[in-house]
Image: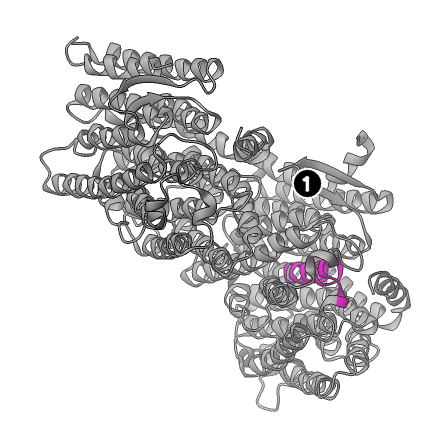
Amino acid sequence: MLLPIIIPIIFGFILPFIKLEDKIRNIYVLCISILTSCMVFFTCSKFYNVPINLLTINNIYNISFNIDNFSKVFMYLLAVLWPITSIYAFGYMKHLDNVTSFFRYFLIAYGIALAVPLSANAITMYLFYELLTFATLPLIMHEMEDKQVLHAGKIYLICSILGASMALIGIIILSSMTGTTDFVFGGNQITNLEFANYKQVGYMLCFFGFSVKAAIFPFTFWLPKAGVAPTPVTALLHAVAVVKAGVFAVMRMTYFGYDLNGIRGTYAQVLPMSFAIITIIYASFMAVRAQNLKVRFAYSTASNLSYVLLTAVSMSESSLVASLTHMISHAIIKISIFFIVGAFLVSYHMKTIDDIKGIGGKLSISCACFVISSLGLIGIPLTCGFISKYYIITSLIDVHSIFATVGILAIVISSILTVIYTMTIVIKMYFPGNNFDYSEVGELNEVPNLMLIPIVITTVGVVALGLFSSQMIEFFKLIAQGI
Amino acid sequence: MYSMKDYILLLPVLFPIISALFTLIIKKQFSDRSFREKYVFATLVLTLLFTICTLVKGGEVVLCNLTENLPIKLKVDEMTYLFNMLVSVMWLFSGFYSFEYMKHEENNESYYLFYLLTEGVLLALGMAANFMTLYLFYEFMTFLSLPLALHTRTKEAISGGLKYLFYSVFGASLALIGFFFMNYYGNIEFLAGGNLYPYLVSGNEELLKVIFFLTILGFSAKAGMFPLHGWLIAAHPVAPAPASAVLSGVITKAGVLAIIRVIYYQVGVNFLRGTWVQYAFMTLTLITIFMGSMMAYKENLFKRRLAYSSVSQVSYALLGLSTMHPIGFVGALLQVVFHSVTKNMLFMCAGAVIYKTHKTFVDELKGIGKNMPITMWCFTIGALALVGIPPMSGFVSKWFLAQGVINTNIPIYNYLGPIVLLCSAFLTAGYLITISISAFIPGSDFKYENVQKQDPNFFMLIPLIILAVLCVVLGAYPTLLINFFASIANLIM
C-alpha cells in the first residue's frame, strides 16, 4: 500500500545520481509517473479500510496509513493528472536550466502528495502536509537567480508554515478532546468533556490553518506571487496538488475529524463560511484587475477553491458531494487553462492580456481549447464546470440559512466576474479590432506537440466529465453516506 | 426508449450547425461569392422545411442526461410553433437580404458561419423542454451571435459586442439562480400552468418571489428591458444591417420566450399574480416603453433610433406578459410576431439606405424617398405598423395589450398602462413617420435635379416587399393568429 509513496520518492531522489541524457531522463520520469499512477490504481482497488501502522510514538500519536473512498478521490485525481503534466513539462522545461533537479523534486512531490490522502490520522496528514511544502519549495524557486523568485519562495514558505502550525494546534485540541486523531466518518465523539468548549476554536484553527494553502482571504496573496514558478508547477501544484491538498485537509477535518454536529450552526461554521464568501468575491475582483495571465488565473484559482471550502463547511447532506465534484472539475479546467497560458508564455513570451491579441486565427487548436476551458470555468452546461456549480448551489439551497443564500449570491457574482476575466481574453484573441496590424503577431506555429497533447487531453476531459459525470457522482454519494 | 423517428427533432438544429461547420472544410469554394450565396440560401430554405416537418410531426426527445435528473430534452409544444417559425422565416429573409448587403463588408465567410450556427441554436432554444435545456441554448445563443454583433471589428463594434456579452451573461447568471431554485422547489420540466411543488414552497414564498423576480429580470436583459437595456443600443447599430435585423427582430424575442417559459410554464401565474413581483415587472416594462420611445425620438443616428424603438416595442410584449391575463398574453404574442416582422423590415430599409448612400443620420435623409421610392414606401408601411394605425399589424396587438392591461383591474396601472401606450404611440409616430415625411416631402429647397434612382437590386427589395406585405396582411386578417394564441392562453391560465 505504501508503494505509490515510496516509488516516486526513491526514484526521484536518485535521479541526479544516475546521470542520464535528456531524452532518456524524460522517458525515465514519464515511466516512473505512470508506474506510480498504476500503483495508485492497483492499491486503491486492492485495499479498502485496512490501516497500516508504520510507527507508534504513543497511543495517540502514530504514523499510519489507510485507504478509504474519500482518499481514493484525491489519489485518482493526482494519478491522472501527474503523468499528463510530466509530458507537458518535457515540452515546457526545454528552455530552462537544471531540469534534472526540477524533475527530482517533481517526482518526490508526487510521492508526498499521495501520502496526504493516504494518511489515516491527522498527525500523519500534518506530517506529509509539511513535507509537501518543503518538497514543492524547490519547484517554485526553480529559477533561483531572480530576486522576485526568492521573495515568492519565502512568502510561500512563511504562509504555509504559519498555516500548518495553526492546524497543528487544532489537531492537538482534537486529540485532547477525543483521545484520538484517527479519521472516522462523521467525526470523533468527544470523550474528554473538560476540553469540549474548545471544539469550535480547534475546528476554526484547523480550517484556517489548512485553508492557507487554499489561499483563503487574507492569505490569498501567496498564490499569485508563486506564479513565478515554471508553469508545470503552477498548473499542477497551484491548480491541483498543493492547493487541493489544503482543501482536502479541510474536508478531512470537517467530515472525518471534528464532530459535525458540534460545529454546525455555531460561530465556528459561520466564520469560515463568511471568509470563504469574502474570498470568492475578492479574488474574482482581483482576477479581473490582473493583467498578467498567470496572476489572473491564480486569483481565479483562489476564488474557485473557496467555492469548495464554502460548500464543504456548509455541512448539509449533499455538500460533501458538491465540494468533491467541484474539486475535481476545477482541477481539470484549471490545469488545462494553465497549460495553455504556460505554452503561450514559453513559446511566444506572451505574458499579459495585451500580448495575446489576434492570435486566435494562428494558434487555432490551443485557442479553441482555451475557449472551451474558459466556458468550463464560467460554468456553461455541457462542461464539468456546470455540473459542479449545479451541485454546489443545490446543496447550498439545501442548507436553508442566510449565509448559504449569501453564498449563492456570491457564487453568481463571481461567475459573472469569471465571464469578464475570461471572455476579455477570448475577445482579444479573436477580435483584436480592425486597425490591428496582424504582422505584429507574425508567423506563429502551433504550440509544440509535447505541450499540445496534454492541453487537448485535459480539454477533452472538461467536456467529457460534463457529459458523463453520473458514475463519479454515484461514487461521491457513497462517500457522503460514510462508506 | 426513443425511436429513430423522434430524433428527427434534431434535424433543424443540427442541419444548419453541420452545414455551417462544413464551410470550414470547404473553405476554398466557400470564399467564392456565388457559391457561398447558393450554399447559404439552400441551407436556410432546407432548415425552414425541416422546421416545418418537425413542427408537423411534434414529439419529444431526450438527448442526454447531465446528471440523473437534468436531461437535455427537446419537445415541440405550442410556443415552439410560434418561435421556431418566426426564427426560420426571419432567418431566411434576412439571409436573402444579406447576400447583397454583405458585398460591402469583409469577412463574409465568418459572418455566414455564425449566422447559420446561431439559427441552429435558436431553433433548439424554441424546442427546449425544460429550464436546463433553455439555459444551455440561451448561453450558446449569446456566444454564437456575438461575432455577428461585432462583425465590423471597429472599436465601437467591439465595445458594443462586449457590452452585449456582459449584459447577456449577467442576465443569464441571474436567471440561473432561478433555475437552481426551480430545480429545488419544483420540477424544471416546462408544464403549462407552472411546475412548482406547493408543499415545498409553503413557508418560502418571500424568498422565491425575490428569486423569480431576479430570473425575470435576468432574461429581460435579452429583451432589452430597463435597467438592462444598455447593450441593445450599443450593439444593434454597429452590427451589419441584416445582423441588426435578426438581433432586434428575433434574438430579443428569445428573451421574451424565456420569460414566458419562466412565468407561465415554470412558476405559474397563480404564484405571481397580484404580488409585488407582478407590479415591479409591470412598472419596469412601462418605464421601458416610455423611455425607449423618448430616447428614440431624441436620437439622430438612424439605426440607433431603430434600436431604441426596439427597446420600447419589445417591452410592449413584456407588458402583455406582466398582465398575467389571457387578453394581455394574446396581445404579447401578437406583438412578438408583428414587431419581429416590422423591425426586421425597418432595419433592412436602414441597411439599404446605408448600403446605397452611406447616409447614417436621420437628418441626412431628406428627399431620400425620391431616390429610393420602393425602400421608403416599405419603410413607411413599417412605420405605420409600429405606430399602430389600422389596418396595419401593430394596431391589433396594441389593442389587445391595452385591453389586457385594463382587464387586470390593478388600481392605477389599469389607467396608467393605456396612457403610456398612447404616449408611446405618439412618440413612435414622431420618430418614424417624420422620417417618411421628410423623405418624400423634402421641402422647397430640395434640388430635384440631383435625384437619381438608387433603389437596391432585387436581392434586397424582395425580402423588404414580402415583409411589408406581411405587415399589412397580418394586420388585416389576424383572426387565425388570435385564435391560435388564445388557445395557448387558455392552456396556461
| Horizontal arrangement in the rendering, residue A75 relative to residue B240 (left or right) | left
Say which amino acid is labelled 1: Pro
Rendered location of residue B59, percent (x, y):
83, 42
Segment tinted magenta in the rendering: B250-270
Residue with the mark numbered 1: B71
Q: Is residue B262 within the magenta segment?
A: yes
Regarding residue B474, the answer to whether it shows in the image is: yes
Residue ID at (74%, 59%):
B198
Rendered location of residue A133, percent (x, y):
23, 33
Task: Give A179 or B432, whichever is nearer the viewer.
Answer: A179
- Quarter of the image for residue A230 reads top left
Task: Give B44 or A351, whichever is nearer the viewer.
Answer: A351
Tell me the chain of label 1: B
Mark 1 nearby-residue class (10 Å; few <14, some 14–19, many ≥20): many
Residue ID at (60%, 70%):
B225
Quadrant where the N terminus of chain A sits is top left
